[in-house]
Amino acid sequence: MIKKYLIYSLLIIVAVGMAFPIVWMLILSLKTNPETLDNTSKLLFSDYNLNNYKEAITSDSFDKYLFNSLFVSIIVTIGNIFFCTITGYVLARKKFRGNKLILISIIGVMMIPPHVIMIPLYRTMVNFDWINSYQSLIIPWLITPFGVFLVKQYLSNIPEAIEQAAIIDGASQLQLLFKIIFPLAKPIIIVLAVYVFLMNWNSFLFPFLFTNNSDYWTLPVGLTFYLGKQSIDWGHLMSGASMSAIPIIVLFMIFQKQIIKGLTAGAIKE
C-alpha cells in the first residue's frame, strides 16, 4: 500500500511539473503588460482579460503565420504517411540485395543531429533557388528516417498470411497496399501522423534558416519577433504561444487511445 502511494505521489509531482509551464504561459497571456507586474501576487491576482489574444489574432501577420504552419504541417504529414508507409512496407516484406544495408543507413541517419546538415541543406536550397518558398519548407521533410523505421518495425510483426490470402484471391499490389497494409497499419500511421505534425508545427530552425521573407514565416518564426532587443512583449508572445499549442493539445486528446495502442503494439505477445 505504501509503495502504491509513493508511486501515485511521484506521478502527481511529475504531472504538476509538466503542467506548470503551460499554466504559467496561460496566466501571462491573460495579463496586460505582465512584464510590469514585479511580484507573483500581483501577477496572479490582477485582472485577467483576452486583449492579448484579440490583438494577436487581428494583427496583420498572425493569420499568415498560422496558415503557413497549418499548410506546411498538413502537407508534410500527408507525405510522410504515404512515403514512410510504402518504404517501411518494402523493407519489411520485400527481400532484395541491400535490404539490410538500407535499414542500417536509415538507423545511421537517425543518429545524426539535424544541426550537422544545416549548411549542406542550405546550399542545396540555394542551388535549387528554393529560399523563401514553400518547397524548402515541405520537400526535404516529406519522408523521415524515424517514420520509415517505425512503420517497418510495426509491419514486421504482422503475419504475412493475411497478404498471401489476399494475393490468392487475386489482389494486385496496389490493392494489397491500400486495402490491406494501410488499414492494418492504421495505429502506427496515427502515431506517425501526430509525431510528424508536432515536429513540423513546432519547427523553428530550418524555417528560420530558409526564409527571410515574412510571407513564408511559420508561427514559431513569427513569434520570435515578439522578442525585442531591449524588452520582451510577454503578453503577446504568450498568447501567440498558447494559440500555437492548442492544435497539438486537441490532436493528442482526439487520438490519445490510438497513439497509446500504436506505441504499445507488439509489446505483449499473446
Image (cartoon, rainbow, N blue to C red):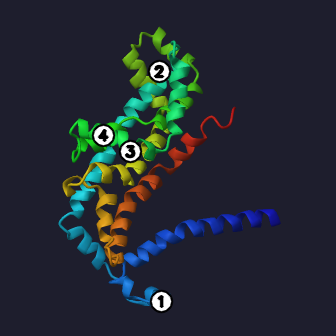
Does dot 1 land on a helix, a strand or a loop? loop
The alpha-carbon separation of the residues under discs 4 and 1 comes to: 48 Å
Residue that label 4 marks? 123
What x and y, as percent, mark residue 70? 29, 51
Q: CA distance from mark 2 to mark 4?
A: 31 Å
SS label for mark 4: helix
**Quarter of the image where one finds residue 243:** bottom left
Count of marks placed on residues: 4
Please determine whether, in this image, residue 269 is positioned above or below residue 23: above
Please say if the residues under marks 3 and 1 sit with CB atoms less than 8 Å apart: no
**Vertical arrangement, residue 146 with respect to residue 2, above or below:** above
Q: Amino acid at mark 4?
A: Arg
- Residue at x 23%, y 52% (from the top left corner): 216
Residue 38: x and y, percent? 44, 89
Q: Are marks 1 and 2 in contact (CB under 8 Å)?
A: no
- Where is mark 2, residue-wise? 90
Left or right of 87, for residue 60 = left
The kind of residue on which mark 3 rests is Met
Give the mark toward the camera: 3 or 1. 3
Q: Residue at x 44, y 30 (%)?
A: 85
Looking at the image, which residue is at 23% across and 54% down? 212
| Number of other residues with Cα within 10 Å of mark 2, as a class: few under 14, some 14 to 19, many 20 or more | some
Query: Of the residues shown, which amino acid type is indicated by label 1?
Result: Asn
Q: Which residue is mark 1?
A: 39
Residue closer to the observer: 201 or 248: 201
Q: Residues within 10 Å of mark 1 (few under 14, many from 20)?
A: few
- Quarter holding the N terminus is bottom right
Disc 3 crowd, CA 10 A, few/some/many (<14, 14-19, 20+): some
First in sequence: mark 3 or mark 4? 3
Task: Say whether disc 4 or disc 1 marks the residue closer to the N-terminus.
Answer: 1
